[in-house]
Image (tube, rainbow, N blue to C red):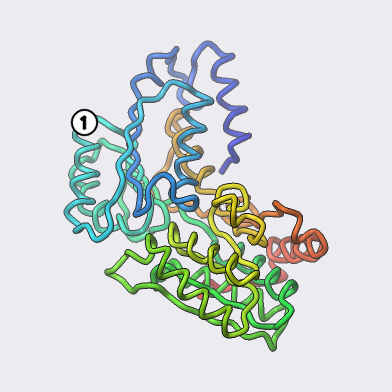
Amino acid sequence: MRSIAMVLAGVALVTASCGRVPGTGATIETDYAKSLRVGLAYDIGGRGDQSFNDAAADGLDEVRRSLGLLQIKEFEAQPGEPLSSKQQRLQTLAENGYSPVIAVGYAYSDAVRTVAPRYPHTKFAIIDDRAASGPNVANLLFAEEQGSFLVGAAAAMKSKTGDVGFVGGVQSPLIKKFEAGYRQGVKYMNPKAKVRVAYLTRPPDLTGFDNPAKARQAAKAMYDGGADVVYQAAGASGAGVFQAAKDAGRWAIGVDSDQAKTADPAVRDLILTSMIKRVDVAVYDYIAALMDGTVASGPSVYDLKLGGVDYSSTGGHIKDIQPKLEQLKQEIIIGKIKVSPG
């Protein structure tokens, strides 16, 4: 598994070697890449959610910038849409010759399981789901619990009240991994700390990822109750947590992207750190692997060791505790600290 930098180095070699795709021996010149059509189906929130979907978009944009040779089509999900809409979205891409078709988020699991077998010659990838499987399906997964452990430790070390919170968008197995890692990180540093938890919706209602007002209310209740750090794993709803932090003059923790760089400038100074989930790397890596003939079906897990998750230090708010966080990070990587996904 490669980082974007490593993939770019490989692409440079392709260019330097008269258009050969590594591992295939095929001469492609530029026609091969020009004919590659990439389809991306976003989860609720789409581009502009300043979080999960934007991380996927960043990977796609990096492909566009660095290769400049791909035909790209993007679709967005709508709040409350039926499963048939997701299936139709993927089917439309496949029928129009897009391959790979990348589904952003576990909400596409049933759709991928239904559509992928109908198009055996189309490559599919799904982020955050391993249930959808097949010879033409790749599962791009992350060790969210490991990155969440680190921001949980940061929350515990920066909290003055010993009272912290977690706001999840939807109470699903995936988001429970964020909560589990966060809780373990908090308790590792302060066993007596209180961890408040709130979820905005439960499946099949996925609107918890696109309801900032509801997230703001949930976070406000935590701050009013004594919490001074709240971590959100809520997609576009996270903007509401940031606003509540601004209102209360307390800390918030971002997710997926370095949100001290992507959130509304008015709230960035209240973002203590972010749990970075390198969806951009996964998207880029998958497309590059397809181009060089090394793409494989099945699961690929991006963890701390592979740089798939991490924490951000933008703003300098955790400068005093960063040596400890780096120590914890290395102890997770070598297995000294075991982080359970739930």
Q: Say which quadrant the N terminus sits in.
A: top right
**Placement of 9 over or under 323, stated as above or below:** above
**Placement of 193 over or under 138, stated as above or below:** below
* Nearest to the observer: residue 222 or residue 288: 222
**Placement of 58 over or under 171, stated as above or below:** above
* Residue 315, horizontal then vertical, whole percent: 72, 53
* Nearest to the observer: residue 178 or residue 2: 178
* Nearest to the observer: residue 23 or residue 274: 274
Residue 331 placement: quadrant: bottom right
- Secondary structure at badge 1 equals loop
Query: With 175 as the anchor, is 108 left or right in this view?
Result: left
Give the amino acid type for the residue marked by disc 1 in the picture: Asn
Residue 13 placement: quadrant: top right
> How many numbered discs, if any?
1
* Residue 211, horizontal then vertical, whole percent: 38, 63
The residue at which mark 1 appears reads as 96
* Residue 122, horizontal then vertical, whole percent: 27, 37
